[in-house]
Amino acid sequence: MLLEDHLKQKTLAHAYFITGDAKTYIEKLFSAPLFDILSYHERMGIDEVRNILYRVSLASTQEKRQVVVLHAGMVGREAKSALLKIIEEPPPYTHFILYGVSKKMLPQALASRLLDGGHIPYEEREEYGEKADMFLSADGDPKKREMILQDVADTESLTLFLSALEQRAQGKHVSERMVMLERIQTARVFLSHPIPMIASIKDYLSLLV
């Protein structure tokens, strides 16, 4: 993977995008004492991005580089604009790594400034893959889809189902794929709330194109 190669070669760029569920991979890749990991996986607004800039501007040194890890799907619209400005003129000794479904979910101006660092596949359990296939075969029938999701009743099971659904989106026509990925990502945002409404998220997914 490009990110790993650059780290070994000590040629790290200032911004990368990792496709997939890369949080654990990134946090294991960078270790103390050379790096200080700042991980953000909750919904982010412009104030949070500004706070990140303030923090790294004070803490980054050649001996202690800052690695900012962001879930791309959790960065709000205004925050993405602020993040673009930071990445265009990055603080010294600071590296930004975003991860998520696809760079296409980001504004083109921001996506173009992120190197493709590699891909971490989502782990899939067989039963959720089968459930995702059944769900998609019930195209146009929200009630049938609701029945298929009856036993998806908690945060963990819904997370696994979304990952399986995301894998199947890759084989769709580009326009349908983007609609699916957008809806999946929105469901993940809902799921990240302190008290996620599982039933409402399933209702939302049942209207998936």
Image (cartoon, rainbow, N blue to C red):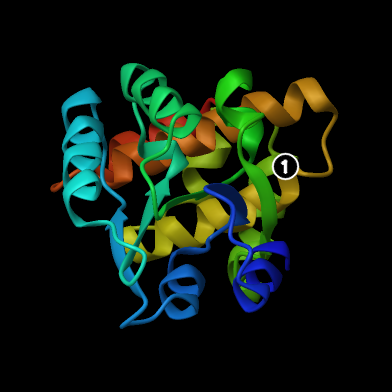
Provide residue 147's location: percent of width, then percent of height.
49, 46
Q: The residue under label 1 is which amino acid type?
A: Ala
Number of residues whose C-alpha sits closer than 10 Å to that of mark 1, classed few (under 14), some (14–19) or many (20 or more): some
Q: Is residue 5 left or right of residue 182?
A: right
Q: Nearer the viewer, residue 77 or 131?
A: 77
Q: Position of residue 32 (x, y in %)?
A: 32, 82
Question: Which quadrant of the figure contains the C terminus?
Answer: top right
Q: Check the picture and name the quadrant holding the N terminus.
A: bottom right
Left or right: 156, with 166 as reference point = left
Q: Is residue 91 above or below residue 10?
A: above
Residue at 47% across, 51% down: 149
Who's the residue at 60% across and 65% down the image?
A: 122
| Image spot of residue 87 (x, y percent) | 46, 33
Where is 32 relative to 73, above or below? below
Relative depth, front residue between 22 and 172: 22
Q: Secondary structure at mark 1?
A: helix
Observer-nearest residue: 59 or 205? 59
- Front-lying residue, 53 or 102: 53
The answer to whether residue 83 is left or right of residue 17 is left
Q: Which residue is mark 1?
A: 169
Residue found 36% across the figure and 38% down from its top:
74
